[in-house]
Image: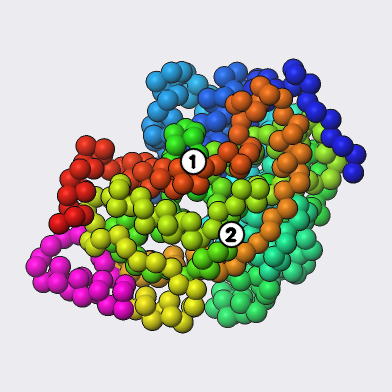
Amino acid sequence: MVARPRSPCGALLPQFYAGRDIFITGATGFMGKVLIERLLSTCPDVGRIHLLMRSKKGHTPEKRLLQLKQSQVFDIIRQQNPSQLDKLLVIEGDVAQPGLGIATEYLKQLQEVSIVFHSAATLKFDEALSAAVDQNVLSVLRLMDICDTLPNLQAFVHVSTAYSNPERYVVDEKVYPSPVSLSRLLALVDVVPAPMLASITPQYIKPKPNTYTFTKAMAEEAIRSRASSYPVAIFRPTIVISSLKNPYPGWIENLNGPSGIVVAAGKGLLHVFCRKPDAKADLIPVDIAIDTLLAVAWETAVDKLSDVRVYNCSTIENPTTWRDFETGLKVYLPEYPLDGCLWYPSGSGVENRYLHKILEFFLHTVPLHVAEYIIRALGVKMKMSLITAEQRLRAMSDVLAFFALREWQFKNDNVQKLRARLTPSDAAIYNLDPKTIDWNEQYKNFVKGTRKFLLKEKDEDAEEAKRHLNR
């Protein structure tokens, strides 16, 4: 492989993004919001940022954009340079619709776009195959069709997942052969009735364990096999968690994966979860992932790639373990307790699945069902039924167990080369280096951020939460 040149001093990322129009799908998601924030805060001269949005829960795309601008993630921008938020523009559409459901007037609006980030996807592991294909595979093809019409496009970056090939324990930065042909898959979901498709799905997607990883792998194959006239890259982050530093230490806004465990354990609902204690937990702070993503788009455009390049965004250079994660929760949840705990945050992980199920029944199912009946008898109203909470807790534990009982080695040579290519000025702004993570500090901020940003609990209530915990 020919060595990639180091960037000249003038080829800084903020200069690269200056004046460029960007198109983003998945902008209202956890990673999407941080992507927008980093573009606006580190690239003051960035052009217009077009956001694909659909109507949802009775709110129009325009209303959702106004709500997005009020998000806590943009607090610093609103304080220091609020006009930056005027660069956010709606593109009304839906990844599940033909042509993304984008009307002609919006297609005209996209003509100046030179960088596309595609991060919209369904994250449900148990999604029906047809829906997962529609949102994770067909959406890519629909978007690439639109990209074919953009005369100024210089980089298309697809956000995949490092776990698109979970049956491989060593994962290189390449697109692996798909488990089935794309044409046959599309024909299958088009003609087979939903009940029959559901019954054959587990066997059909083997060796993939669920429709999420299966369709993410198929999307990568669709990108690799589809000819394009513009440079394309695939970005694969591992398990994305709260931020290291930007926009704030510990910023988190979703309940997926480890953050769900933090909330459940912190509220006293979770007392046991399934994990291999010394297995590497490949957790990546969201700001490191997004800074890497921004650099990937820059390199993709600068190198004018003719073949798809894959970037594995991993903490292989500075690993932590599930034992470390568990210890962090045991130390910091009592120190920074969540409001209204039902029980003292306690418990631990076990490696044996059967033992886990037994303990789960006696420590989660039975106590929460009993508590639910008592609460009902007392006439106390709660935001969520404890029985519903227990069901969600069980589903979340099952999903996390898949990752916490296994260990992967994600090769990240392309990311390391990209990091080495940045100028010192770039590296001072964009952190692509997992070696900068102090895991003890990260877990502390994860807990504090969950309390402050995810649950919106007030700092002035922290002392009362401690008193409640110690009663």
Q: Is residue 70 left or right of residue 43?
A: left
- Residue 381 appears anywhere in the view: yes
Residue type highlighted by circle 2: Lys
Q: Quadrant of the N terminus?
A: top right
At x 36% / y 43%, what residue is drawn? 448
Q: Quadrant of the C terminus?
A: bottom left
> Helix, strand, or loop for circle 2?
strand
Q: Main secondary structure of the magenta part?
A: helix
Q: Is residue 310 left or right of residue 245?
A: right
Q: Is residue 360 above or below residue 102?
A: below
Q: Is residue 87 left or right of residue 300?
A: left
The range drawn in magenta is 362-387
Residue type highlighted by circle 1: Ser
Q: Is residue 246 left or right of residue 168?
A: left
Question: Relative to the observer, which residue lies in front, 74 or 48?
Answer: 74
Q: Residue 328: where, in percent of width, then height? A: 42, 53
> Mark 1 highlights which residue?
243
Q: Residues within 10 Å of mark 2 (few under 14, many from 20)?
A: many
- Residue 28 appears anywhere in the view: no
Q: Quadrant of residue 204?
A: bottom right
Q: Residue furthest left?
A: 378
Q: Residue 81: where, in percent of width, then height? A: 46, 18
Q: Residues within 10 Å of mark 1 (few under 14, many from 20)?
A: many
> Helix, strand, or loop for circle 1?
loop
At x 72% / y 42%, what residue is drawn? 415
Of circles 1 and 2, the one toward us is 2
Q: Is residue 325 above or below residue 19?
A: below
Q: Residue 470: where, in percent of width, then height? A: 19, 55
Tell me which colouring the rendered structure shows. rainbow
> Mark 2 highlights which residue?
280
